[in-house]
Image (cartoon, rainbow, N blue to C red):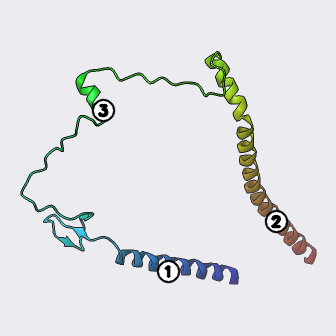
Amino acid sequence: MTEHTNGLSEVLQRINALKRQSQVHDEHAMPVVDDSGHAGETGGIPRLTELYEGELPLAPVAMPASEPPVLNDFVESGEALPAVDIEPPPDLPPELTAEERSEALLAEMMPLIEAAARKAVLQELAAVEYSLTTLVEQEIVKSLKEKLKSGLS
């Protein structure tokens, strides 16, 4: 019963600490703008920048011709995108076929793949070991209690 009471008080203390933290975060929250554009504390959209109060409308910015082309330029003009030639890594002979290159790359990466797999297996084993240990301990305690009760009867 004492353990249950201690656990309950610990949970309540954590809840209170979280409530205090959320209240501190609420005090530092950004100002909120209502529908009329004025800052207030009620619901609405948070104000992230200053309000623009100028008279000039927003106009597109002219870009110099020396700028690199963007995808939209090609789409609008109907031109094909320029081809990009991807060369194989310099440490592989160029006469290899794509299949041979992929096999060479796989062979090169195999130690990394095996190490990652070993690490994942060890992590899973650690998690399973913990849960199994806990389960076995509980079963042992349960069986000992039953033996003691039957021995005392």
Judge the density around disc 1: few (<14), some (14-19), many (≥20) Cα neighbours within 10 Å.
few
* Residue 100: % across, % down: 67, 19
Q: Residue 115 falls in which quadrant of the image?
A: top right
Inspect the image, locate mark 3, and give the three-letter code of the amino acid beneath it.
Pro
Badge number at residue 69:
3
Number of marks in picture: 3
User: Dot 1 corresponds to which residue?
Assistant: 16
Does residue 1 show up? no
In this view, the mark in front (3 or 2)? 3
In the depicted structure, whether residue 41 falls above or below residue 56: below
Q: Earlier in the sequence, mark 3 or mark 2?
A: 3
User: Dot 2 corresponds to which residue?
Assistant: 137
Inspect the image, locate mark 2, and give the three-letter code of the amino acid beneath it.
Glu
- Identify the residue shown where x is 73% and y is 34%: 110
Residue at far right of view: 151
Report whether 56 appears left or right of 75. Answer: left
* Residue 5: % across, % down: 64, 82
Residue at far left of view: 55
Judge the density around disc 2: few (<14), some (14-19), many (≥20) Cα neighbours within 10 Å.
few
- Identify the residue shown where x is 41% and y is 21%: 83
Q: Earlier in the sequence, mark 3 or mark 1?
A: 1
In the depicted structure, whether residue 120 falls above or below residue 102: below
Judge the density around disc 3: few (<14), some (14-19), many (≥20) Cα neighbours within 10 Å.
few
Classify the position of the C terminus by image quarter: bottom right
